[in-house]
Image (cartoon, rainbow, N blue to C red):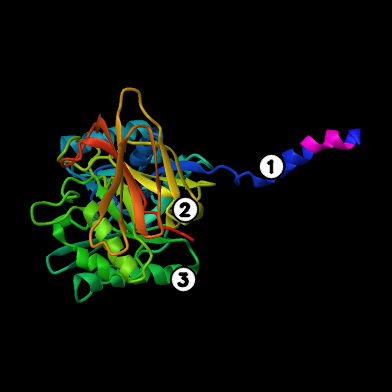
C-alpha cells in the first residue's frame, strides 16, 4: 500500500503531461513582398537578403514583377552616383570572385545572381528562409492589378481578362490550379488594392478562392488609408468579410508587407524595407509550415507592435503585447454580428493585455493594436506602430 501511494504523484504527473499542449509554436518574422534589380528594385538580391536577415527577419520572398530570379540577366548600371555607389558596396562585400561584371565603352554591366546561386549564402535551418515568389503584374485598361504568388517554382505569365475581376480571378485560378496539380503549398495574395484605386470593394467581394490581401503595404503610392472618396484597406477588409460570410466563403486574411524598391534613399516618398511585416506562428521554418499557419489564420501583420501571445480558447481571444517601456497600447476589438451591415468596435482597452469573448452571434472579431510610439519611417498618416490580428470566427 505504501508503495502504491508513492507511485501516485508519478501517475498524476504522467496524466498531466498528456494534457499539455503540443510543442510550443514559434513566431517567425517575414516579408512576402520585396523587389530587387531583377525588376524595378534598386539593389542586388544578396544585399537585400543580407539586410533583412541582419535585421532579424526569418523569411523573405523576393517578388519581382513578372520574373523569377533564374536564367541569365545582365543589368546596365547607369552613370548615376547612387547606383555606382550601390555597385561599389556590393563589390566590397562580395568581391571580384563572386561578382561577374564587364565594362564596355565606359558602360558597366553586372550579371545578377540567380536564387539558386544566392540562396545558400543566407539560408539556415530554423534561422532564415527564402521563399521563391513573383509579383504577377497585370492590368485592365488603366487599372493596375498586382498579385503575389509565393512558394512557386514556375513563372506565371499575367493572364489578362475582360474586367478587373476577370483579370484577378484568372491569375488567382492559375496559382490555385498549379497548387492542385503539383501539391506545392503555393499561395496568392492580392496586393495594394488602392494603388491607383484599381481594385474596388466590389471587385474583392466577387473573388472566388482568394484568402489573403494586403491590409498594409509600405509603398508610398498605395493609399492604405484611402481618401475622401475611397475607403481605406482596413475598412475594406471588414466589408469584404461581411460579404464573404453572407456568401458562405471563408474569411480573407490581411498581410502587412514592405513592397520595398528603394534601398538607398529613405523617407516617406520612397518604398523602403522594414516598414511592415507578418509574424507567423508555426512549428518549423519551412514554406509548408508557414503557409499552413497562414491559412489557419495563425499570423498577424505589424508595423512595429510585437505580440507575446495570441490565444483562441473556447471562443475567447486573449492577447498579450510584448510591451516596450514607456509605450502605451490601445487595443480595439473590431468585428460584426449577424445582421450587421458595417463593422463595429466592440471594445477598446488600453494596456498590455486584453481579451474578447465571442458570443454565438459574432460573425468575426479581430484586434487592432495602436501604440503611441512613432514609426521610425512611416507612410501616409500611419505614424504610430501598429499590429493587426486576423479575424476570428465563433466555433461550436
Ligand atoms: Zn505592385
Ligand atoms: Zn511590388
Q: Nearer the viewer, residue 126 or 11?
A: 11
Label 2 or label 1, whichever lies nearer to me, is 1
Q: Nearer the viewer, residue 83 or 130?
A: 130
Q: Which residue is mark 1?
A: 16
Left or right: 175 in relation to 65 = right
Magenta span of residues: 4-9
Disc 3 under 8 Å from ligand 1? The reply is no
Q: Earlier in the sequence, mark 2 or mark 1?
A: 1
Q: Earlier in the sequence, mark 3 or mark 1?
A: 1
Q: Which residue is mark 3?
A: 180
Left or right: 177 in relation to 200 = right
Q: In the drawing, what numbered circle is on residue 293?
A: 2
Residue found at the very far bottom of the displayed protein = 162
Q: Could you say where residue 307 lies in the image, as x and y percent from the top left?
A: 40, 38
Residue found at the very far left of the displayed protein = 228
Who's the residue at 42% across and 51% down the image? Answer: 131
Amino acid at each position: 500500500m505504501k508503495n502504491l501511494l508513492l507511485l501516485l504523484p508519478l501517475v498524476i504527473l504522467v496524466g498531466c503531461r498528456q494534457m499539455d499542449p503540443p510543442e510550443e509554436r514559434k513566431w517567425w518574422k517575414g516579408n512576402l513582398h520585396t523587389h530587387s534589380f531583377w525588376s524595378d528594385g534598386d539593389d542586388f538580391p544578396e544585399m537585400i537578403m543580407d539586410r533583412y536577415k541582419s535585421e532579424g527577419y526569418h523569411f523573405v520572398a523576393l517578388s519581382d514583377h513578372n520574373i523569377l530570379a533564374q536564367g541569365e540577366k545582365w543589368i546596365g548600371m547607369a552613370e548615376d552616383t547612387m547606383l555606382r555607389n550601390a555597385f561599389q558596396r556590393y563589390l566590397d562585400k562580395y568581391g571580384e570572385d563572386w561578382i561577374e561584371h564587364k565594362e564596355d565603352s565606359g558602360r558597366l554591366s553586372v550579371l545578377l545572381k540567380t536564387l539558386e546561386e544566392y540562396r545558400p549564402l543566407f539560408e539556415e535551418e530554423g534561422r532564415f528562409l527564402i521563399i521563391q515568389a513573383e509579383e504577377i503584374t497585370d492590368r485592365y485598361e488603366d487599372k493596375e492589378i498586382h498579385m503575389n504568388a509565393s512558394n512557386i517554382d514556375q513563372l506565371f505569365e499575367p493572364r489578362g481578362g475582360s474586367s478587373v475581376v476577370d483579370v484577378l480571378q484568372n491569375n488567382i485560378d492559375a496559382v490555385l490550379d498549379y497548387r492542385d496539380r503539383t501539391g506545392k503549398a503555393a499561395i496568392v495574395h492580392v496586393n495594394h488594392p488602392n494603388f491607383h484605386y484599381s481594385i474596388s470593394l466590389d471587385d474583392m467581394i466577387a473573388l472566388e478562392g482568394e484568402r489573403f490581401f494586403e491590409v498594409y503595404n509600405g509603398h508610398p503610392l498605395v493609399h492604405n488609408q484611402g481618401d475622401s472618396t475611397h475607403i481605406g484597406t482596413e475598412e475594406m477588409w471588414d466589408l469584404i468579410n461581411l460579404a464573404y460570410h453572407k456568401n458562405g466563403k471563408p474569411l480573407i486574411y490581411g498581410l502587412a508587407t514592405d513592397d520595398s524598391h528603394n534601398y538607398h534613399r529613405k523617407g516617406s516618398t520612397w518604398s523602403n524595407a522594414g516598414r511592415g511585416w507578418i509574424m507567423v506562428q508555426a512549428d518549423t521554418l519551412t514554406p509548408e509550415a508557414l503557409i499552413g499557419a497562414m491559412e489557419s489564420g495563425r499570423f498577424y501583420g505589424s508595423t512595429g507592435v510585437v505580440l507575446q501571445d495570441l490565444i483562441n480558447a473556447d471562443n475567447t481571444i486573449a492577447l498579450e503585447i510584448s510591451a516596450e517601456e514607456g509605450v502605451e497600447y490601445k487595443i480595439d476589438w473590431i468585428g460584426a454580428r449577424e445582421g450587421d451591415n458595417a463593422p463595429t468596435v466592440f471594445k477598446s482597452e488600453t494596456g498590455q493585455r486584453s481579451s474578447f469573448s465571442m458570443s454565438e452571434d459574432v460573425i468575426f472579431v479581430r484586434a487592432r493594436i495602436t501604440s503611441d510610439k512613432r514609426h521610425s519611417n512611416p507612410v501616409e498618416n500611419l505614424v504610430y506602430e501598429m499590429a493587426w490580428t486576423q479575424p476570428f470566427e465563433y466555433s461550436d
